[in-house]
Amino acid sequence: MNQVAVIDYGMGNLHSVAKAIEHVGVDLANESGQTTEVVITSEPARIAAADRVIFPGVGAIRDCMAEINRLDVGPIVASAIKTKPVLAICVGMQALMTHSEENDGVDCLGLLSGRVQFFGEDLRDENGERLKVPHMGWNRVTQASEHPLWQGVADNSRFYFVHSYYVTMDETDQIAGRSVYGREIVAAISAGNIFATQFHPEKSQHAGLTLLRNFLTWNGAGG
Amino acid sequence: MALAKRIIPCLDCDRGRVVKGVKFVDIRDAGDPVEVSRRYCDAGADEITFLDITASHEVRATTVDTVRAIAGEVFIPLTVGGGIRTLEDIRTMLNAGADKVSINTAAVQNPDFVREAAERFGSQCIVVAVDAKRVSVEDESLRWEIFTHGGRKSTGVEVIDWARRMVRYGAGEILLTSMDRDGTKMGFDLKLNKAVSDAVNVPIIASGGVGNLDHLASGVLQGAADAVLAASIFHFGEYTIHEAKAHMAAQGIEVRLE
């Protein structure tokens, strides 16, 4: 039994992630016999007992961080990343950073060294064409490292994004994937037991499901 | 640029069944929204929009079950619209697996609802549906107003101002339907679409009037749409999603083809 805890702090479409994990879990069980159980929870003991952890998040960072702090989720995530694979998604990834400039500036968990910045009101592509914000839709992700979670995912595959703020990293060797939307952005991060994506694998059809399936068999680290 | 323009098939559903007719070549029951959604997803749709036209509240539970069933099998974004009137409605749909909700009448009746919804759930999941009808007469500069009740009832609200206001209130995307073109197969109202797209900084989904693949392409090229929505051309098997994408790509539009 492979138990996946999806951290529930009241933000994010937890059900989409849970359903996608259950879906790939069934495939995995058919092939290898290994079964997957998904629990959506904020209980530290259940998260500590899980084999792997998903840290999702959507919406505004101020609200997310307020709930993360209120429920004391920070130490739970910090403790999880020491011992098991953790997948952070979208605002979940942003929450791992040092600081976000959204909502007039919000301190984040600081588990990774980097900042979250606004795309800007006047974002343009290389031809000077105006780009809408949020960055919403299917964009290409260029893999920056060989990582077990990219296995079976073609380089430059499209994933589904929806966000108005993007991450910049202090340690560029932690960047696992890049995208371009007016500027280069960090699309995925790999740091020890953490794999984090700005895009939504649970909404990215084949490429996303492949990544989630890889997460179910990843032992952590080795990025 | 690398962001793909999206193609979104739209399912109108009543009491948990797809209406307006859906006819795929080789499936027997084309009225099952889960089956139809899965087909479109497999065919390369970038997103699914599910519009619930069920009038009575009692059978709404069916809709929630349907959304849950679709979300359990279709791993691309799912937008649910029709009858979204309260924050509780939104929570119910998001919990059932919708990624976005589309708000129409409730926004017109109470614009602050959009603000409350965006504050509570985030702009990324709030789509405001705008039903627009051209009201300008000849020799007058173009002007559109918001209409309700399927295009029968004027609200007197000017479309460009309204779109700007909805974005200011937190709408993350606008689903723009031309009531003049809806069902005509004459193509999108490109001037309407361009005017709204230029006026706001969030993505615009063009809707209403698609009759052929050129219409989809011109929605992007001339109408400045970020996504194009269509129903009947896909439902009746006139064109596949893949043909639509290939046609758009041939005109230089970035689409997701893998």
Image: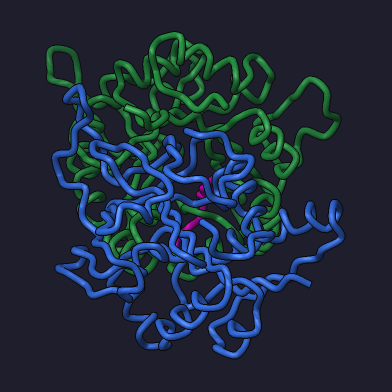
Chain colours: A blue, B green
Most distant residue in the bottom direction: A45
Whether residue B214 sits left or right of residue B56 in the image: it is left
In the rendered view, tell whether residue A25 sits above or below residue A65. Answer: above
Vertical side of A34 occupied by A130: above or below: above
The mark total stands at 0
Residue drawn at the location 21% of the way across and 26% of the way down: A126
For the question of whether residue B104 can be seen, the reply is no
Q: From the top left corner, tell me how far across and down residue A200 is, in percent.
A: 49, 52
Asked whether B84 falls inside the magenta stretch, the response is yes
Inspect the magenta stretch and tell me whether residue B219 lies in it. no
Please give left or right for residue B107 compared with residue B22 in the image. Answer: left
Determine whether, in the image, residue B127 is placed left or right of residue A195: left
Residue B139, x across and y down, in percent? 13, 12
Front residue of this view, candidates B99 and B133 = B99
Residue A82: % across, % down? 50, 78
- Which residue is at 20% across, 49% downward? B165
Q: Quadrant of residue A90?
A: bottom left
Q: Quadrant of the N terminus of chain B?
A: top left
The quarter in which the C terminus of chain B is drawn is top right
Residue A26 vs residue B170, the one in the foreground: A26
> Which segment did they paint magenta?
B77-85
Q: Name the one closer to the observer, B211 or B137.
A: B211
- Image: B36 above or below A117: above
- Horizontal side of A184 relative to A64 (left or right) equals left
Is any part of residue A67 visible from this angle?
A: yes
In this rendered view, identify the residue nearer to me: B155 or A209: A209
Q: Residue at x 59, y 59 (%)?
A: A16
